Image (spheres, grey):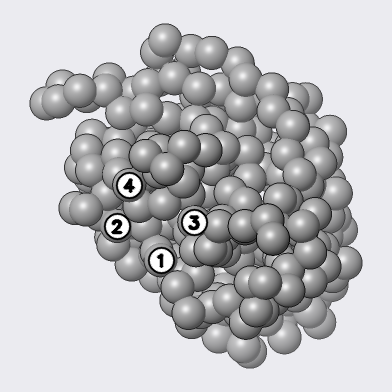
Amino acid sequence: MSPTTPHPASPEARAEIVLGVIGGSGLYAMDALEAVESVTLDTPFGAPSGPFTVGQIPRPEGPPLRTVFISRHGPGHLVLPGEINYRANIHGLKQLGVTHVLSASAVGSLRAAIVPGHAVIPDQLIDRTKHRAASFFGAGCVAHVQFGEPMDPGFRAELSAAAGEVLADDELAELHDGGTLVVMEGPAFSTRAESELYRSFGADIIGMTALPEAKLAREAEMAYALLATSTDYDCWHQSEDEVSVDAVVAIMRANVARVRKIVVALAERLPLRCEALPWPRALSGALMTDPSKIPAATRARLDLIVGHLLPEVTNA
């Protein structure tokens, strides 16, 4: 890299907003994208769920917004929640210049007021996952990012406004702005005892994929917000039948059309440049390791994540 070329993870190189969309169950493509290209990437953390779709969303009052889409479970929905290579997906989005990540996710409702078909934009997470690689760091490089607010407040506010516009006249899809999402391991749904436990936590919805996705987006210094659509009442609501895949899929299909409209409405609201809607500078002050002690292989693997904050290596 020449001295005049900014590091690809630096603010100078990431000045324009690029929207990333991670599609959950049912959302396997983005039909609003134009000038589409399919991009297959390798990452230092292995293979992503599948190819990335790179294109742009046209906007009536300004230039189109560059957008990158990936299906979280891969083409044909082949990957379990616990098998997803979250690190590769997030790293691949960053390789393609993404600054702001919208995660779309099908969830179960833990509250009577959140009816199947409703949309929720949570602001908190509870981690009940197991055995998932939850950080880019390790192997001789230690960092601890702040995660008290797991959703980026500014980006989340734009998502909430966009969803409110789209759902304002939808009699079947009320918007719930705020709430706590429990992220469980899966792939089986909850026991009734677990479902009641999560309700006692004060949680509102339950899913299987937002973590470690949100943590990794924070480490990668990308603004992250989540659009959840309720498909069922989990199993706590004993007046309802227990969750069946057929029932979930039927409601999920109706939700997908709404999600696509919300993505377009969000794209139309976003500013052109990150100075108007900044991505988090999460790694400033988070690195604990003496940079001179970071092994060369680790430094190379983490270059796109933290390389902009590390001094140049000089040969003696």
> Which residue extends farthest front?
316
Three-letter residue code for mark 2: Pro
Q: Nearer the viewer, mark 2 or mark 4?
A: 4
From the viewer's perspective, tell me whether residue 203 is left or right of residue 11.
Answer: right
Q: CA separation, marks 3 and 2?
A: 17 Å
> What residue is pinned by disc 3?
308
Q: Position of residue 89 (x, y in %)?
A: 67, 43
Badge 3 crowding class, 10 Å Cα cut-off, few under 14, some 14 to 19, many 20 or more, is some
Question: On screen, 39 above or below 78?
Answer: above
Q: CA separation, marks 2 and 1?
A: 9 Å
Question: In this figure, what is the number of numbered marks?
Answer: 4
Q: Which mark is residue 12?
A: 4
- In this rendered view, identify the residue nearer to me: 73 or 10: 10
Q: SS at mark 1? A: loop
Badge 4 crowding class, 10 Å Cα cut-off, few under 14, some 14 to 19, many 20 or more, is few
> What residue is pinned by disc 2?
278
From the viewer's perspective, tell me whether residue 270 is left or right of residue 35.
Answer: left
Q: Which mark is residue 281?
A: 1
Q: SS at mark 2? A: loop
Question: On screen, 16 above or below 233?
Answer: above
Q: CA separation, marks 4 and 1?
A: 13 Å
Q: CA separation, marks 1 and 3?
A: 11 Å
From the viewer's perspective, tell me whether residue 222 is left or right of residue 11.
Answer: right
> Which residue extends farthest top?
35
Three-letter residue code for mark 4: Glu
